[in-house]
Image (cartoon, rainbow, N blue to C red):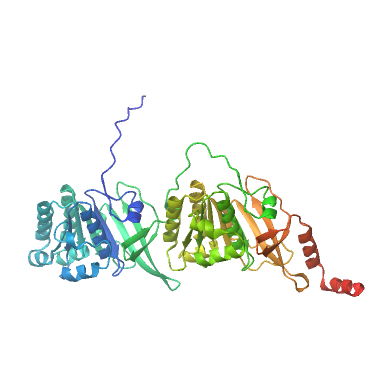
Amino acid sequence: MTDEPSGPALPPLARLTTGIAGLDEVLSGGLLRGGSYLVLGEPGTGKTTLGNHVAFRHAEGGGIALYVTVLAEAHDRMLLHLRGFAFFAPELVGGGIRYLSLFDELRDRGLEAGLAALRRLVSESRATLLVIDGAGRFEDFAASRAEYRRFSAELHAQLALLGCTTLLLAQSAADTDPMHALSTHVDGIVLLEDRIVDARATRRLLVPKLRGSDSLRGHHEFAITAAGVEVYPRLESALIPARGGQRPRQRRSPLGIDGLDAALLGGVLTGSTTIVVGPPGIGKTTVGLQFVAEGAERGERGLIAGFQESPERLVAKAEGLGLGLGAHVEADRVRFLWQPSAERPLDAWVGELLGAIADHRPQRVLIDALTDVARLATVPGRLPAFTAALVGALRSRSATTLLTAEVPTVEGTGLDIPLPETSAVIDNAILLRYVEPRSRLHRLISVLRVRESGFDPGVREFTITDRGIEVDPTTDGAEAVLDDAARPPESADQDLGAAG
C-alpha cells in the first residue's frame, strides 16, 4: 500500500479585519470574507457600538458598509451618540457607510420581501460589509417557526453568494440559553457580557464558535472607551513567541547591592525573573530601584511598572538614596509605566506593559508589585497561570525582570515563609524580614532560590541608608541577631543582671 501524494497547499482564507486590534487577535486575524457572524449580548453590553466601530473602520479602509436596522428607530439619534467616539467620521456617512431601516419592508411585506430588499441593497451598493442591528427581531415578522428557520438559512446562504461579510447583532436569549435561533447557520458567534464581580463592573467577550479558523479560547475582557471598543486578549491564551535558534549565553546582572550580589555569586542571570518578597515598608521597592539604577549605570535600558507611587515620587525616593535615577530618566534610559487605578482590566495593563517593552526594549524590568497586579484580576485563582504566561512573555523578550510582592509581616527566627503561590514559576526568590530582639528592629535578607546557578543561602542583616540598601558582607551580624531573638526572655534578663 502506498501513500497518496498530497495535493497543493490550499491558500489561506481571505480575511476581513474588524479594525479593532484586540478583537482581530482573538479572531486570529479577523472575520472570513463572505461569512456571517452573530454578535450576542444583553442590552447595554456594547453590540451597537461594536457594530458601528467595525463599520467605520471598514469604510475608512475603502470598503462599503451598510448598517441596517430592523427596529423602527431614527438613525439620527444613533449617530448623535456615536459622535463621542474617536472612530466616528461624519464625512463617511452616506458614502462609505450607509444607514438604512428594514422595518417598513418587513412590516408591510414580510420576511421574504425583507430578504429580497437586503439582496438588492448589497448588490446595488456593492457592499462588502453588512451590519444588521436588531437581527433577533426578524422572528417577530415570521408567520411560523418553520418560516423563520427557513429565512435564517437563506439569509446566510444568499449573503455568502454575494461575497458580503455580515454581522448580525442580536439580544441574547434567556439566561439559561444564551444562544440564539440564528446561531445554527452563522460562521461564528461572539458573546458579550457585562457582569459585576465583587462590586466591580467588568465586560467580557467569548467566541464559542468560529468556522474555518482558530480563535483565542476563553473569556477576554473588553471596555468601551472614547476610542470605541477595546478588546484585551487574555495573556494565557495568546501565543508567546519562542526564541529562534540557540539560547543566548547568560551572564550575571548585578543588582547593585554588594552583599546581596555576593550571595548571588555576582548577580542574577540575564533573562531570569526574580521575586523579592517581604512585609510592608521593609525595602522591596528600594531593592527594585537599585536593580534598575545599576543597569542604567551600565548602559542598560530600564522600565519601571508601578501602581502606587507616581514616577515623580519614585525618582525623588531614588535621589534620596543617592541612586541618580533622575538623570537616567532624563536621558530616556529609564521609563515608567504607572497604573494608579485598580479598575483597569488586567489584560489591558499587560498589553500596555508589553507594548512599552516593545517600544523601549529594556534589558531590565521592575514590576512593583505583583500584589497590585493581582488586584486587577476579576477571576479568582487566575494569578498563577497569568504569572506563568507573563514570565514567559518577558523571557521571550530577553528582559531580566524583578518583581516585588507584599506578604504578611515576616518576623522572628522561624522559616515558615509565606511565599505567594505564583513564585513557583519564578526563577529566583529573595526574602526580606524583620527580627525584633529586645525591642530593637532588625532587617534580614536571604536568597531562597536561584535556578541554574549556585548561591549562598546565608542570612544577612541589612540597613537602608542615604546610599540605598547596604547588606553585611558576612552572616555574623544576622547570626547574632537570630541567636538573641531565639533566647527566652528569662535568659536575656539573667545576662543583664550578671552584667550589672
Q: Going 16% across and 68% down the picture, which residue do you hit?
A: 75
At which x and y percent is residue 253? 60, 48
Relative to 117, is 498 above or below?
A: below
Left or right: residue 485 compared with residue 365:
right
Q: Quadrant of residue 341?
A: bottom left
Q: Quadrant of residue 407?
A: bottom right
At which x and y percent is residue 334? 50, 56
Left or right: residue 155 compared with residue 87:
left
Q: Quadrant of residue 500?
A: bottom right
Most foreground residue, 154 or 352: 352
At which x and y percent is residue 300? 54, 49
Q: Going 67% across and 64% down the picture, which residue do you hit?
A: 465
Q: From this viewpoint, is residue 421 visible?
A: no
Q: Residue furthest left?
A: 108
Left or right: residue 353 compared with residue 211:
right
Q: Going 43% across and 74% down the picture, which residue do you hit?
A: 199
Relative to 113, is 299 above or below?
A: above
Q: From this viewpoint, is residue 124 visible?
A: yes
Q: Going 32% across and 47% down the picture, which residue do you hit?
A: 213
Quadrant location of the N terminus in the rendered image: top left
Q: Residue furthest top?
A: 1
Most foreground residue, 303 or 450: 303
At which x and y percent is residue 29? 32, 49
Most foreground residue, 185 or 364: 364
